[in-house]
Image (cartoon, rainbow, N blue to C red):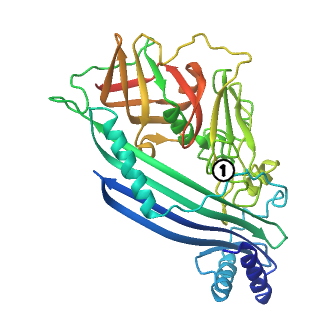
Amino acid sequence: MNSKEITTQISEAADSLNLKKWDYGASFSNDYSVQVDKGEAKQLKASQKQILTIRVWNESNLVGITTTSDISESGIKKALNQANIASDFGNKNERTEFSPLAKDPIEVKDSKKRNPVGIKKLLTLLREAEVKLLESHESIKSVPYNGLSESFYERVYANSDGAFRSYTKSQAALYLYARAEEKNKKPRSSGSVKLGYGVEDLICFSPESFLTIINAFSSMFNARSIIDGVSLSNKNSIGEKLSTEALNIYDDGLHEKNISSSPFDGEGTPTKRLCLINKGRLENFIHSESTARIFKTMPTGHAGLGSKVSVSPDWIVVEKSEENSDLKTSLDHSTYEGEFVYIEELNAIHAGVRASQGSFSLPFDGWLYKNGKKISIESATVAGDIKYLLKNIVNIESNQEVTTSGISPHIWVDELSITGDA
């Protein structure tokens, strides 16, 4: 797609309809994916998508919005007209404007342009990966969940004030989920042990599970959630001590390890590294143009595109602060010989998290380390309060790991409630 031609079409159509103020965001993509089952093709997919989200401001400066996949001249004119009609029903109590940073320079990471390898090659590669995984250990009997995909896409933002920015990106993803079994044994070990609440209970969160719970409670940093009254924070929470002084948390959508990085948000505001928690204290909220105006600050590059703009984090980076650390232990999950629970993956996030209250009760996959043995946990739940969890961090390991949702080290927490079977 030629994004500049589309912008010109929108501008000309808007002029013909006498629409003075508008903006749009667009996404164009080509996606290919395959799945296999014991060497046989299970699912093959190829798709092409094009989506335009157009906003129009009327003479009363109320905004209307519409979405279309028709980028023909008539389709664009129809979408503008629909957005204009919708603007009559815009929210008079909360105005939306262009981001004041929509024309600022953006940082686009250099990346080698790849070409699609195609469905046939993807299928061959995934078959080879399945075979290698099955041959890697005698206990691995099947790989029931797997997939290999590649995507090629372009993202665009432009407005009637002259802002225009776009970027293109490609990415690939491989997913393999193996099932291990041993003769005369279940995939999970038998027996039962009850894990209770007590001062000597230690829980180690994997990087994936800790990032999952931070993202689940990201409303603490979200200015839109604060305005809507569904956040644990309020406008005066900046500076509040939330955790150990050793904890730093950033939102860093431009991090070099973030394959899906975007140099600008839905409103065209440049993406940047933003410190959310600095040495245990809340330092910044994430903002759209409208929330930043209410808080009398600048947008941070975390907005969607809409009449009531959503705000969400990009890529969380958890770090250990070496200065003024108040940690009293130096636990390491790979060498610690005492008893502890290792939480590998949290489940049922949408059902088990009450973000506005701070509480959670979540089933998880993991392991019980006891007397030098590693026991697979069959069924267990971890429950608690996010602020309590953050304040009871007893160690942050030094080594960080890259995940699909961010970067984090292993995090050790004391005194959470865990019940279940192993």
Q: Viewed as shown, does residue 406 lie left or right of 347?
A: right
Q: Residue drawn 29% across and 39% down? A: 179
State the residue at coordinates (64%, 27%).
242
> In the rendered image, which quarter is residue 304 located in?
bottom right
Q: Which residue occupies the foreground of this view, 407 or 300?
A: 407
Would residue 247 appear left or right of 198 to someone viewing this image? Answer: right
Note whether 171 is above or below 415 in the view shown. below
Three-letter residue code for mark 1: Ser
Alpha-carbon neighbours of circle 1 within 10 Å: few (<14), some, or many (≥20)? some
Q: Count of labels shown?
A: 1
Return the residue at label 1: 261
Q: Is residue 299 above or below residue 411?
A: below
The quadrant the N terminus occupies is bottom right
Q: Position of residue 414 (x, y in %)?
A: 49, 18
Image quadrant in which the C terminus is located: top left
| Circle 1: element type | loop
- The answer to whether residue 27 of the structure is visible from this angle is yes
- Where is residue 176? Give x, y as percent: 39, 44
Q: Quadrant of residue 244?
A: top right
Q: Is residue 356 visible in this depiction of the protein?
A: no
Q: Quadrant of residue 170?
A: bottom right
